[in-house]
Structure formats: C-alpha cells, structure tokens
Image (cartoon, rainbow, N blue to C red):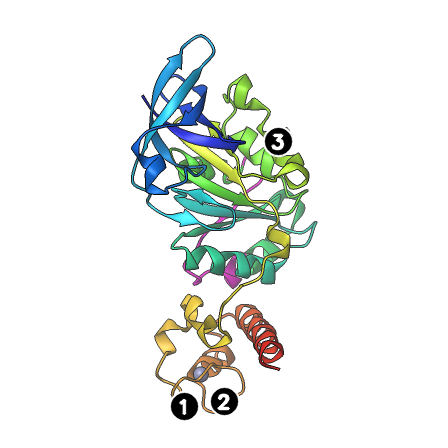
Amino acid sequence: MQGKIIKGIAGFYYVHTASDDSVYECKAKGAFRNMKIKPLVGDDVEFDITDAVNHNGNVIDILPRRNELIRPAVANIDQAMIVFASVSPEPNLNLLTRFMINMDRSGINTVICFNKTDQADSDRIEELCDVFENSGCKIVASSVVKNEGIEELKSILHGKTTALAGPSGVGKSSILNAVFPDANSQTGDISVKINRGKHTTRHSEIFALPGNTYIMDTPGFTSLECDGMEAEDLRFYFNEFGDYEGRCRFNGCVHVNEPDCAVKEAVDKGVINSTRYDIYSVSYTHLRAHETLRHL
Ligand code: ZN
C-alpha cells in the first residue's frame, strides 16, 4: 500500500491513503529504521496492513523526498500559501515578505492570497496586489461572499500539498470550505482544527482533502524571523532587484545608503514598487542591527 504520513505522535505514524480516503495507524518497520531516516509528516510511504479492521499497519519504506522543511518539520511541500484579509485585520506586509523569503530559502514558491475583497474598496486591493506584482509570487484576490477567486484557488490547491499560513480572522477555513465543499466528515472538521492549531500544535499535521490534496497549517509564523540570514544576502530574495544587480556604482551595493544605486533610481522612477522597496529597507536595517548585536 502507498500513502502519506499526515500526523506522527509518540512513535505512531498516521498514514492517509488517497485511493480509499482512509487513515492507518502505523509503526515504523523495515530497513529505513537502520538508516537513521526519521519519517516526517508529508512523507509518501509504502506500508503493510497488519489489521484491516482496526486500520493498523507498518511503514516499510519512505519514498524519495522532494524537499524538507526544518520548521515545521515536514516533507514534500509543493507550495506555500499565505492568506491575509484585504483590510481587517490589516495585512502585515513585512511578515508576508519574511514568510515568502523563508519559503524561498527552502525552494518553495509562495502564493499570496488577499481575502475578503468584499470588505475593501477596489483601489486598496489593486494597491496591495501592485506591491507584490513582480515579486515572483502568484497573487489571488478572493472573497467567499462574492465567490471571487475561489475557482482560481481551487486550481492552485487541487492535487497539491500546500503549507497554509495567515493570522486568525482572515478567513482561511472559509476559503477551504468554499474550495472543497465536498470534504468528507473525517476531514470536514478542518476549520476547527485550523482555528485551534496555534494552541495545540506541538507536532505537525497535514489535513487530507479530496483529490489527493493536502493542507498543512503553519502555526507560529507570526513570530517568524529570517534566522541565520545575512543582511547582505537579503537583496537576492527580492525578485524586483534582479535586473539591476551589478548596475549600481558600487560592487556589492545593498541598495540602502549607497549613492548612484540603480535599484533606488528604479524606485524613484516608479519601476520598482516603493512599498515593496520600503519593506526591503526596513528588513535590511533589522537584520543588520541583529548582526551588530551578535558581533558585540
Ligand atoms: Zn544599489
């Protein structure tokens, strides 16, 4: 049998099979135990059923991982999606950017979703989308109330494993309910799970949805930092700057205080979004201050 580990607790691995939408409680057996590979949530595994009635089994092999996140410890994430409300609560664009950078560092693309567009005026939504237009991320404006962007979200999420992030109150669970109205009873309480996620999540957990679709809630992201990142390297995570790299007066220009900076000129001309640049400059200063503290 093949399935995906959706939860791991105290030596047990809960393996979901998309073919019959069942969950098996498994122990780890077999060769990989001696190879010091620890099964992770998100791992695609081979397993033997030892008790078909009680849904017990043994994991016997872990299929090759496409990628692996450290925090949270999960494997095989296809993409990340971060959801913010368009107005209330006000989207935290610095936090959004830190999230994108952290995912980017693990080789994972982020989809940005500005939800509850029915509560914002269209200028505001356009303004928000403009900030990230050239960031390299896909952007979706959505509203469950207006049924806007729901089909697009469906095509983005369907058949993929997505790390989902966003503060509470932005409508993550209503999006999922709108996108997957036919989620079965076993997975149907996903909204409850997502909402209480931040209180109970000592371990990672993935939720199975119809059509080989998996969602992993990403708690704790509100305190997200770009750990271990050098301020010098931050600029490489801003897609917008790519065209200007090497065109500044100084080699290794970090585009903050240097004169004759091609990036700052592009900001002045309005070619690079100024809000996006401000996020960069604040983040750079923040990282630099931390470095200085470390070296004292
Ligand atoms: Zn520069």
Give whichever of 39, 239 is nearer the camera.
39
Left or right of residue 215: residue 30? left
Q: Determine if residue 124 is in view.
A: yes
Give the foreground label among 3 and 2: 3
Name the residue beneath numbered marker 2.
258
Mark 2–mark 1 Cα distance, whole angstroms, equals 8 Å
Q: Check disc 3 and give the amino acid type.
A: Lys
The span shown in magenta is 129-147
Name the residue beneath numbered marker 3.
193
Mark 2: which secondary structure?
Answer: loop
Please report the residue visible at 51 percent of the width from the left and 81 percent of the height from the top: 268
Above-or-below relation of 77 to 182: below
Q: Is residue 138 magenta?
A: yes
| Quarter occupied by residue 196 | top right
Q: Say the numbered circle drawn on residue 132.
A: none
| Quarter occupied by residue 250 | bottom left
List x then y, in percent, for residue 14.
47, 26
Left or right of residue 80: residue 64? left
Residue contact between numbered discs 2 and 1, judged by CB atoms under 8 Å: yes
Mark 3–mark 2 Cα distance, whole angstroms, equals 48 Å
The total of numbered circles placed on residues is 3
Residue contact between numbered discs 3 and 2, judged by CB atoms under 8 Å: no
- Cβ at disc 1 under 8 Å from ligand 1: yes
User: Label 2: how many residues lie within 10 Å, few (<14), some (14-19) or many (20+)?
Assistant: few
Please report the residue visible at 37 percent of the width from the left and 72 percent of the height from the top: 242
- Cβ at disc 2 under 8 Å from ligand 1: yes
Please report the residue visible at 41 percent of the width from the left and 66 percent of the height from the top: 239
User: Label 1: how many residues lie within 10 Å, few (<14), some (14-19) or many (20+)?
Assistant: few
